[in-house]
Structure formats: C-alpha cells, structure tokens
Image: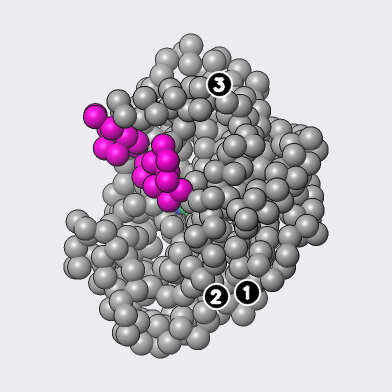
C-alpha cells in the first residue's frame, strides 16, 4: 500500500525541505510516509495509489462545501479566462468584501491579503500603530501563523518573560509578546495589572482549533472584554479557522462579542490562498493609503481567489450548506459520545469542527491537551487510514466537516472510530 506515495516522498525530499511545504504534512507526529494526493471531490480525497479517503482535514478547513464544488469551479473557470492577475482594483474585491460584511456586520472595512499569517501579522501592526503601544497578549496553544511575534512561548516562572519558540526569532521581538494560558482569567488579569498600559491588544482564537476545539468560558470572555475596555487595548479575534466554521457568522456571533479587529482566511478563499483583516472603520482607516500604517501585496485581492471566495460564501448564504455540515458534525459527535467511555475520551465540537481528545473532559487549555493520552494517537490515526478515513495527522488539530459528509459517511465514521479505538487498546 502507498507505494507511489513512498516513491514520490523520497523524490520530494531531495528537493523540497522535508519533502513538504508545510511541516504538519510530513506526518512526523504519526510516523510513516505522508500520502500524496492526486485529486479531491466532495467529501473524499484520492491518493496517488488510488486509495479513496473520507476527508476530515478538508485542506485544514477551507473546503466547507466539500472538494471541487461545481459552483466554485465554475466561478473560477469563468474568471480565469479574463486573466490571472491585474495588480489593480476589480469589482470582485468589493463583492467579496460585502459578502463577508453580510456575515460579520462588525467588519466595517476590510483589507485582503494572501494568507492567514499575513492577515495576523498585519493586524498586529495595525493594533500597535493604532494604539501606539508595544505589547501583544497571546495564549498558549493558539496559532496565528508563523510571523515572528507569534512564535513565542511563555517563559518559565515569570509570566512576562516570553522567549522565542523558533530559532531565528529574536528575543528583542519575543519580549513584546506576552503569553498566557487560555481560559485563565486570573493570569490574564495579573498580566494586565503589571503591563496593561503598554498592551496594544489581545489576540486569540475565540474558539480554538489549533489545540483542538476549545470554547472560552464565560468568565474568560468577560475578562477579555473588560480588560480591553479598561486599558484601551484592542480585542483581536483570529477567526481564520473559526470564521464560517464554528458558526456561519463567526465565533463572534456565537459569543455575542464585538472584536475590534477580525482576522480571516481559509473559507473566505474557498480553497485558494486568501486572508483578510477587518474591523471598525476608525481603526482600519489607519492603514495605507488612508493612514500611516503600511501594508501592501502584489497579488492581494487576486481575481481568481476572489471568485472562489465569492462562490463559496454565496453558497453558504443562499443554501443550507453550512447547516447541513453542522448537523452532520453534531450528529457524529453525539453518536461518538454515546459509544465512547467518558473516563477516557472527550468529544468537543462547535459548528462544523470537532475534536476527539484522549482524556476525560472538559478540555479547557493547552495543559489539558498535553495531558491527553497522546501516545495512542498515531495508532488511532493509522487504524482509521486503513479503513479509508483521513483524520488530521496530529493530535492537536481539529477535524473539519463539509456539507458533503452525508449520513452514510457519518455512519461509517462512527463505526470505524469505535473499531479503531478498540483495536489500538489490544
Ligand atoms: N490563524 C489561525 C487561527 C490558523 O488556524 C492559521 C492556520 O492554520 C493561521 C492563522 C495561519 O494561516 P495560514 O496558514 O493561511 O498562513
């Protein structure tokens, strides 16, 4: 099995760093070779070895309509005939911006970029430029892309002494990122008591996906809001993953919270590279050319990407695609909860995302995730794969569902998860 993938991987490793263009794809956390994918359709991906896999990764979230949705493909095909890139305004940018605003009315103005990373790093510059403050607060386990200020870990002992979490990140950069535990209001309050006047903003995944699906507690959420108000810091919701996934209108609607800046990516590009950041006009107007904060991009607002995003969001707006995916996700999670031993497993889900944690719940922060029985995960992953289910190849990642995951797929998943868990116990 996977003979071709093996061969292609060894070829790729000769020329591509680690054989991949994003580390998690190398399957390091689960061992064995990564699978090479030759096509994807609906809820399935197809490997070079012709294995058809039910996909719970969905390109790490974007493909909420399933792969190669006909309307998205059609929209791209129509647009592509008119040229690939103009480096000049097109009406498609305004159309996608307005669509996003319909879903997230707090976004008064928006700027498109090419990835979530770019959106997060630009939002951070905006927060600093707008508030004229240096520090940013982030949370352990939340991911905001790979820009320097976010590759930072909490220093031991002293909360305010952060350190680089990657070689190549300077301490002079990491020192301005303060790191705190998710859902820990006391720590956060302490951090603000010490540094509040210098904090430009708090950035967080309002419902996390990068350490699995974890919602904020009510106390945590109200503390975030209160501290931002008291200290004139900006509340920055990184909805690259949660937007159009945890709730059709973003986690901000679900949590009834108005962030100052929202960061988007993934679904808004429908599978093509796209990111965006937006928020209150008064803040966004500080960006060039309206204001003094510089940010630009040769391919930003690319017409093909915009066409893909427009088709995807139009589908979410005009059909029950989101609701279908959400129902499938809820049903799957309820069935799994019925079948699995609560003392050993916990399922957490929101909208069209879910996580199976190898530990008694609830899971509230990164420490809880790290205390899961992580050793079981690689075996579980491969047991699923043998039964044609493609789960994210890392215990820390959330699973994604599309509107093409129908009853038949869900039934198969419930049975296979149960079987795989019992196999790996033996
Ligand atoms: N923010 C969040 C919440 C993400 O999940 C990700 C990627 O997974 C990013 C930012 C970075 O986005 P990208 O990979 O498009 O740079």
Helix, strand or loop status at disc 2: loop
**Depth order, front residue of 21/61:** 21
Q: Which residues are magenta?
A: 13-33
Q: SS of the residue at dot 3?
A: loop
Q: Any mark on residue 335, and which? A: none
Q: CA distance from mark 1 to mark 2?
A: 6 Å
Circle nearer the N terminus (1, 3): 3
Identified at 36% across, 30% down, the residue is 9
Does the beta carbon at disc 2 come under 8 Å from ligand 1? no
Q: Is mark 1 within 8 Å of ligand 1?
A: no
Graded by Cα atoms within 10 Å as few (under 14), some (14 to 19) or many (20 or more), the crowding at tag 1 reads: some
Front label number (2 vs 3): 3
Decide: is 338 above or below 378.
Answer: below
Quarter of the C terminus within the rendering:
bottom right
Instruction: Report x, y in % for residue 303.
Output: 46, 25
Residue appearing at x 54%, y 67% in the figure: 372
Instruction: Give the labeled residue for mark 1.
Output: 217
| Residue position for label 3 | 50
**Disc on the earlier residue, 1 or 2:** 2
| Numbered circles on residues, count | 3
Q: Which residue is mark 2?
A: 183
**Residue 87 image offset from top left, x and y in percent:** 35, 27
Element on which disc 1 rests:
loop
Q: Quadrant of residue 32?
A: top left
**Mark 1 or mark 3: which is in front?**
3
Most extreme residue toward the front is: 426
Q: Which image quarter: residue 115?
A: top left
Q: Verify CB contact (< 8 Å) between mark 1 and mark 2.
A: yes
Query: Label 2 vs label 3: CA separation?
Result: 44 Å
Q: Horizontal and vertical percent for residue 383?
A: 59, 44
Distance between the alpha carbons at the discs numbered 1 and 3: 44 Å
Inspect the magenta stretch and tell me whether residue 361 lies in it: no
């Amino acid at each position: 099995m996977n003979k071709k993938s093996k061969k292609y991987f060894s070829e790729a490793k000769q020329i591509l760093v680690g054989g991949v263009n994003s580390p998690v794809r190398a399957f390091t956390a689960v061992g064995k070779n990564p699978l090479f994918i030759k096509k994807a359709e609906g809820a399935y991906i197809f490997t070079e070895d012709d294995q058809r896999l039910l996909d719970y990764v969905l390109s790490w979230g974007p493909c909420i309509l399933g792969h190669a949705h006909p309307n998205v493909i059609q929209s791209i095909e129509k647009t592509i005939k008119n040229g690939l890139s103009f480096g000049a305004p097109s009406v498609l940018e305004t159309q996608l911006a307005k669509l996003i605003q319909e879903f997230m009315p707090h976004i008064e103005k928006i700027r498109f970029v090419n990835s979530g990373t770019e959106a997060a790093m630009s939002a951070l510059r905006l927060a600093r430029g707008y508030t004229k403050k240096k520090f940013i607060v982030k949370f352990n386990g939340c991911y905001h892309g790979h820009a320097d200020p976010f590759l930072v870990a909490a220093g031991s002992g002293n909360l305010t002494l952060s350190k680089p979490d990657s070689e190549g990140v300077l301490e002079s950069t990491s020192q301005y990122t303060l790191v705190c535990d998710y859902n820990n209001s006391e720590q956060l309050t302490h951090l603000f008591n010490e540094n509040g006047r210098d904090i430009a903003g708090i950035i967080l995944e309002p419902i996390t996906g990068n350490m699995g699906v974890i919602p904020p507690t009510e106390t945590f959420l109200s503390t975030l809001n209160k501290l931002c108000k008291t200290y004139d810091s900006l509340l920055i919701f990184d909805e690259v993953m949660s937007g159009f996934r945890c709730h059709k209108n973003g986690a901000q609607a679900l949590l009834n919270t108005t962030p100052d800046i929202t960061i988007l990516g993934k679904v808004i590009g429908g599978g093509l590279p796209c990111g965006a950041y937006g928020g209150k006009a008064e803040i966004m107007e500080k960006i060039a050319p309206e204001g003094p904060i510089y940010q630009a991009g040769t391919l930003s607002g690319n017409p093909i990407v915009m066409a893909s995003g427009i088709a995807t969001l139009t589908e979410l707006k005009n059909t029950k695609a989101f609701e279908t995916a959400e129902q499938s996700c809820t049903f799957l999670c309820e069935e799994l909860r019925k079948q699995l031993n609560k003392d050993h497993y916990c399922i957490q889900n929101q909208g069209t995302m879910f996580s199976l944690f190898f530990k008694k719940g609830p899971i509230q922060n990164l420490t809880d995730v790290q205390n899961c029985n992580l050793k079981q995960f690689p075996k579980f992953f491969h047991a699923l794969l043998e039964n044609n289910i493609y789960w994210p190849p890392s215990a820390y990642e959330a699973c994604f569902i599309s509107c093409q995951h129908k009853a038949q797929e869900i039934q198969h998943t419930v049975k296979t998860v149960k079987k795989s868990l019992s196999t790996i116990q033996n």
